[in-house]
Image: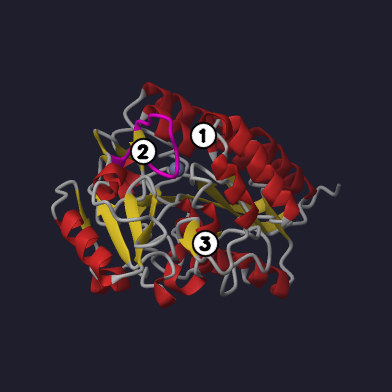
Amino acid sequence: MSDKKAAQISIVVFIDALGWDVLKGRQFMEKQLPFRRKLRSVFGFSSACIPSILTGLMPREHKHWSFFYYSPETSPFKMLRLLGFLPRSLVDRGRVRNLISKFIKRLYSYTGYFQLYNIPFEHVDKFDYCEKSDLFLPGGMNRGDNIFDYLSRAGVPYHVSDWRDSEENNLKAVKHDLEKGDISFALLYMASMDALLHEVGKESPLVDQKLAWYETQLNDVLHTASEHYEQVRLFICSDHGMATVHTHVDLMSKVEALGLVFGRDYVATYDSTMGRFWFHNEDARKRVTSLLEQVPEGRILPQDELARLGCDFEGDQYGELIFLMNAGFLVVPSHMGVNPITGMHGYHPDDPDSDACLLSNAEPPNDPRAITDVFHLMRAESGA
Ligand SMILES: [Zn+2]
């Protein structure tokens, strides 16, 4: 290795769920990163927010949102319907579902994040899945180009973490590439803050501990980078924050009590913060709508609001009716998880707990206001 330093490196560190409000009242890299701003999130879970960060597009445009959508014609899960005839106590064990998820992933050569979650096997053949490809590779989007398409077309030498790997290994890998001094842009992916916040909530001292750990690790990254580059530009960004859950609502039982037949009258999927519905007749639409209008813990999102949120999909791909819970209310049971949880996201972007953050040691280019602007920042920083 020569003693001559390379000119400049821009490092973008993505910390999942590091919300603006999670940082409130806490000290986190304030000296190193004095430029601090709130970013508006995108409506949806990480499966919608991360594609928006990587493309600068809204969900309507890149077509990634909640993982499952009604599409019996294209459903890759037809064979799993048979498992619906086996006792739930057997097939619904977490380990069994994980094994089946792995099998499906391999069978169809999916390279994206794939989990069956808790979708009931007797209905799984009605759904398709939106994240079949690796979002962190060129060509990874359902529609549009991501930052990796731009970087590879422009021939920018870059580093990107393997999202399947641990934070420790991702830190090692980025430092290794920084030491070689060949790259001019790096995207470091850190996923475990999200899991911690779901588990313990944003008030927990364990969150302070985790932030202190990130600070130590990222100081080390900064140090390594400054040994090999004249100028180091560091940005930390996130996709959303975390609200504290205070009330569970059994939306599924309320809908099922209407006596409509799932699959004949309607189809629904219950995410942690929303219910999404498709209707096969007007009576079902009317009855579900008037029921949901009486549920005070959330509300039906009107079409014009979905359009403003960038979540008005062609052909109502992700639901003809979207019922969203108010922040802090959790849909239990849902098709997403069975374990009790302290924190949740995926509420309305107007909720302060939805806000993401951008922290940096240099004035960020293009006056970023929303998580989609991180894409433009990455293009400006990398020259892609
Ligand atoms: Zn999460």
Residue drawn at x 29%, y 35% is 244
Colouring scheme applied when the structure was drawn = secondary structure
- In the image, what residue type sits under mark 1? Arg
Q: CA distance from mark 1 to mark 2?
A: 15 Å
Using the image, tell me which numbered label, if any, was put on residue 113: none
Can you see residue 58? no
Q: Which mark is first along the chain, 2 or 1?
A: 1
Kindly identify which residue carries mark 3: 51
Q: Mark 3 and mark 1 in contact (Cβ < 8 Å)? A: no
Quarter of the render that holds ligand 1: top left
Q: Which residue is mark 2?
A: 333
Real-space Cα separation, disc 1 to disc 3, in angstroms: 34 Å
Measured as percent of width and height from the top left, residue 323 is found at 27, 57
Report the predominant secondary structure element of the magenta stretch: loop
The answer to whether residue 303 is left or right of residue 357 is left
Q: Secondary structure at mark 2?
A: loop
What kind of residue is marked 2? Answer: Pro
The picture quadrant where one finds residue 278 is: bottom left
Kind of residue sitting beneath label 3 = Pro
**First of labels 1, 3 by sequence position:** 3
- Across and down, in percent, residue 10 comes to 60, 56
Question: What segment is highlighted magenta in the picture?
Answer: 330-342
Q: Is 124 located above or below residue 315 in the figure?
A: above
Q: Nearer the viewer, residue 89 or 212?
A: 89
Q: Nearer the viewer, mark 2 or mark 3?
A: 2
Label number found at residue 88: 1
Dot 1 surroundings within 10 Å: few (below 14), some, or many (20 or more)?
A: few
The Cα atoms of the two marked residues, 2 and 3, are separated by 27 Å
Query: Magenta segment: does it hold 338?
Result: yes
